[in-house]
Amino acid sequence: MNMQLLVNLTSKAWSLKILAQLHAGVSGRQAPLIAATGASRSSFAASLEHLFQLGLLERNPGHGHPLRPEFRLTDKGKAVAAMASRIEEIVPNEDAFSVLRRSWTVPILAVTGAPSRFSAIKSDLGPVTDRALSKSLGVLEEQEWLRRDIDLSQRTPFPIYHAVNAGLKINQAIAAGAR
């Protein structure tokens, strides 16, 4: 999957969950989607608008009342929703899924399928700040989705990061969507 799209997609907390629910067959109307995701109305609305802007959702023409529209996935959205669904299957627990709602979690897991240095991760992600990346790496380590090792093979030791456990499964789910 295109890294810029993945970074943009995960910048809104409920985007993955909305896509996964649509992929699972939840009605494309606002009330059923809010109930299925557990999002607040304002957060849901922001994520929904974001999915429109990314071209992943569209209004279902000819269906729904103008004040209660029905939504559907675009062709591009169907592929991304399938990936979101695979990720949700790996992390069905709501506490763990709350980690996935953080902005940089999924993009970091996408680039750490192989051991990577901090600088390589940062350059792969683009606009991430050092602070945001460092904090996100720490959260993923606590969740045990990422392992931090120290490489002693060179004169100056340095840390390397590698997705493990559910983090590695999420990495593989993202890679499967790229094929």
Image (spheres, rainbow, N blue to C red):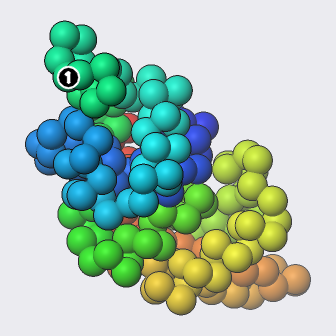
Q: What residue is rendered at 81% in x and 59% in y?
A: 129
Q: What residue is rendered at 38% in x and 78% in y?
A: 96
Tell me where residue 107 appears, x and y as whole percent. Answer: 55, 55
Up the image or down, 5 lies above or below 99; here it is: above
Q: Nearer the viewer, residue 144 or 120?
A: 144
Quarter assignment of residue 40 = bottom left
Q: Secondary structure at mark 1?
A: strand
The residue tagged 1 is 64
Q: What residue is rendered at 74% in x and 74% in y?
A: 134
Tell me where residue 127 appears, x and y as whole percent. Answer: 76, 47
Regarding residue 171, the answer to whether it shows in the image is no
Residue furthest right in the image = 156
The amino acid sitting under disc 1 is Gly
Crowding near the residue tagged with mark 1, few <14, some 14–19, many ≥20 C-alpha atoms within 10 Å: some
Q: Nearer the viewer, residue 149 or 35?
A: 35
Q: Is 83 placed left or right of 105 in the picture?
A: left
Q: Is 136 placed left or right of 24 in the picture?
A: right
Up the image or down, 51 lies above or below 141; here it is: above
Tell me where residue 162 appears, x and y as whole percent. Answer: 54, 73
Regarding residue 35, the answer to whether it shows in the image is yes
Residue furthest left in the image = 25
Q: Is 169 placed left or right of 135 in the picture?
A: left
Quarter assignment of residue 136 = bottom right
Q: Is 90 placed left or right of 39 in the picture?
A: left
Q: Nearer the viewer, residue 64 or 107?
A: 64
Tell me where residue 11 appears, x and y as whole percent. Answer: 58, 50
The quadrant the N terminus occupies is top left
Q: How many marks?
A: 1
Up the image or down, 52 lies above or below 159; here it is: above
Quarter assignment of residue 82 = top left
